[in-house]
Amino acid sequence: MKNILVSIDFGEKYSLLIDKASELAGKSGSKIWLLHVAAPDPDFVGYDVGPQYIRDFRAEDLKEEHKTLSHLVDLLEKNGFETEALLIQGATAEMVLSESQKLHVDLVILGHQEHSLLYETFVGSKSISIINKSKIPVLIVPMV
């Protein structure tokens, strides 16, 4: 195993995913790719861009997400792991699948938390969608 992709959403327990990736990379010498898929730009989903303050707020969010990813890369590299991070915008499941193929990933690590039936019905599960479409092994880490 040469490449591990970790999809991070910056929820409360994303460190569980990084810990699991570190454990596996330590045993196999794999490179760790941290991937955060940010919400798409409003233009991407067919909405008008909106007022300047909305664009400024969105830009600040992306800057903070980038800073957090950079900090995580620094921590992993200090612990001896070859690490790179990607911050991209788009639909989460599609972007995880696309990037995992581009990067020749051997394993995708995702977090999963249980939601209500109503949530699953209307929103769905990104991790289930990735599992169903992936040709690459996927490790699901319970986020409990």
Image: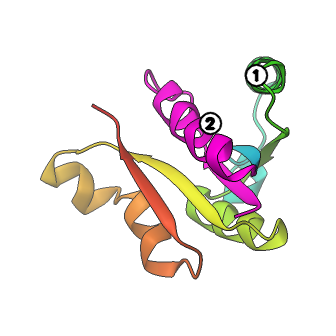
Q: Which residue is mark 1?
A: 79
The amino acid marked with disc number 1 is Asn
Disc number at residue 8? none
Q: Write the start and end of the magenta stretch as one range.
A: 1-30
Q: Which residue is located at x 52 percent, y 25 percent?
A: 15
Quadrant for residue 9, please give it. Answer: top right
The quarter in which the N terminus is drawn is: bottom right
Q: Position of residue 26 (x, y in %)?
A: 66, 40
Q: Please state which of residues 128 and 138 is positioned toward the viewer in this rendering.
A: 138
Quadrant for residue 2, please give it. Answer: bottom right
The amino acid marked with disc number 2 is Ser
Q: SS at mark 1?
A: loop
Judged left or right of residue 111, residue 78 is right
Q: Position of residue 70 (x, y in %)?
A: 83, 23
In this rendering, the answer to whether 128 lies above or below 26 is below
Label 1: few (<14), some (14–19) or many (≥20) C-alpha neighbours in 10 Å: few
First along the sequence among labels 1 and 2: 2
Label 2: few (<14), some (14–19) or many (≥20) C-alpha neighbours in 10 Å: many
In this rendering, the answer to whether 62 lies above or below 124 is above
Q: Position of residue 90 (x, y in %)?
A: 70, 55
Q: Please state which of residues 2 and 140 is positioned toward the viewer in this rendering.
A: 2
